[in-house]
Amino acid sequence: MSNAATADFYALEDLLEPAEIEVRDRVRDFCEREVTPIINDFWERAEFPAGLIPKMAELGIAGGTVEGYGSPGMSAVAAGLVAAEWARADGSLGTFYGVHSFLAMQSIALLGDEEQRQRWLPEMARMEKIGAFGLTEPEHGSDAVALSTSARRDGDEYVLNGAKKWIGNGTIADLVLIWARGEDGNVGGYVVPKGSIGWTATRMTGKTALRAVWQAEITLEDVRVPAENKLAHCSSFKDVSVVLDRTRYTVAWRALGIAEAAYDLALAHTLRREQFGQPIAGYQLVQEKLARMLAEITSMRLLSWRLSKLADEGRMTAAMASMAKMNNCKKARAIVADARDLFGGDGILLEHHIARHHADIEAIYTFEGTDHVQALIVGREITGISAITGRRSSRPREEQAEPPQSI
């Protein structure tokens, strides 16, 4: 099969290391065997396929770039490829894995001390304990820096009060990282165990995207957690931003994965579907769509690969990650819409998979920082002026708006 037919028109496979190709192919094979045959039914019923968790654990990829503690210590390129493969199969499972590996585990690895890492990460790497990340609040989305959930010290415990919304894995997680503002006004991270008194997690319903993963609305009423559950190296929102910057680039890969799936599905369909005596792939309007889809995917792949290489070198900035998320999600949204169009009426049937991707890209386009907020982060980098505050970006980082890592 030609490179064009496999969405690798510029032979970008040559840029990848053998270990990166191996883990990508391992996840792709798993998804083809275990995910694709069953996911439409779970998506339609809005049920999470919990039975897949032990099988996912056997892949040995939980934690992504986290080194040690049973995690694989992948390169940022490998972690991006894995994120793309989950999304290529299903956006819901991609979200489940991303919240657990890229948000919850990365937070503990980056901001916890050695005792905390030893206490939580090995079980999370084995997926015996599932993690969640509680930042977004009902009244604070793009302005997550203004979060109002509070933490008060009381002897050997902290008392948490507040509310969170759009918390992926929130109803099933064993450990939820709650970001709260302390009595000194600074933001800290608190690991709240499942079953804590005063904790309520309600599954959100009525979603039209990512239906096979559960998000929660969480309320905390005098929830007590041991003082040793406060992440040792988090003392301000600036520290939280370290995690956000390190994980946001994977969303650009997830958008790429959905775009690749849409292209593959559309190409196969147009070669198979005949109208007026020939495959519709032979018509000019169809070929023009396919050509433009492939061109956009090629540029998305190059951007994602380069961004991840910069991340591996410690040179990636928040604005770089925002540009990739902004660019790839917008392009993926258009690619999936064109692919659904090429399916005609069949495009709204789940059995063809494209309808699921068409719905799910809307969530990915929005979460972890909307398109507009990502543009403002890039704009701030270009001009030195924050369009949100109207002030120059010499202000402390913790006082600047930062897109949330929800869902």
Image (cartoon, rainbow, N blue to C red):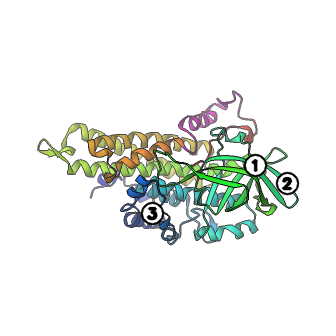
Name the element at disc 2. strand
As drawn, the label of residue 153 is: 2
> In the rendered structure, which amino acid carries the disc numbered 2?
Arg
> What residue lies at 68% left-to-right and 49% top-to-bottom?
219
At label 1, the amino acid type is Asn
**Mark 3: which secondary structure?**
helix
Whole-percent x, y for residue 7 in the image: 35, 52
Q: Three-letter amino acid code at disc 3? A: Arg
Discs 3, 2 touching: Cβ within 8 Å: no
Disc on the earlier residue, 1 or 2: 2
Residue 219 in magenta stretch: no
Region in magenta: 367-393
Residue at the image position 42 percent from the left and 67 percent from the top: 30
Is residue 124 depicted above or below 397 in this figure? below
Check disc 3 and report the residue beneath it: 24
Please give the name of the residue rendered at 71% of the width and 60% of the height, measured from the top-left corner.
Answer: 196
Q: Nearer the viewer, mark 1 or mark 2?
A: 1
Q: Could you give the CA–CA distance between mark 3 and mark 2, rounded to whole angstroms? A: 45 Å
Residue 20 sits above or below residue 273 on the image: below
- Distance from label 1 to label 2 (Cα)? 12 Å
Query: To which residue does mark 1 refer?
Result: 161
Q: Give how far apart the Cα atoms at labels 1 and 3 are.
A: 41 Å
Q: Secondary structure at mark 1?
A: strand
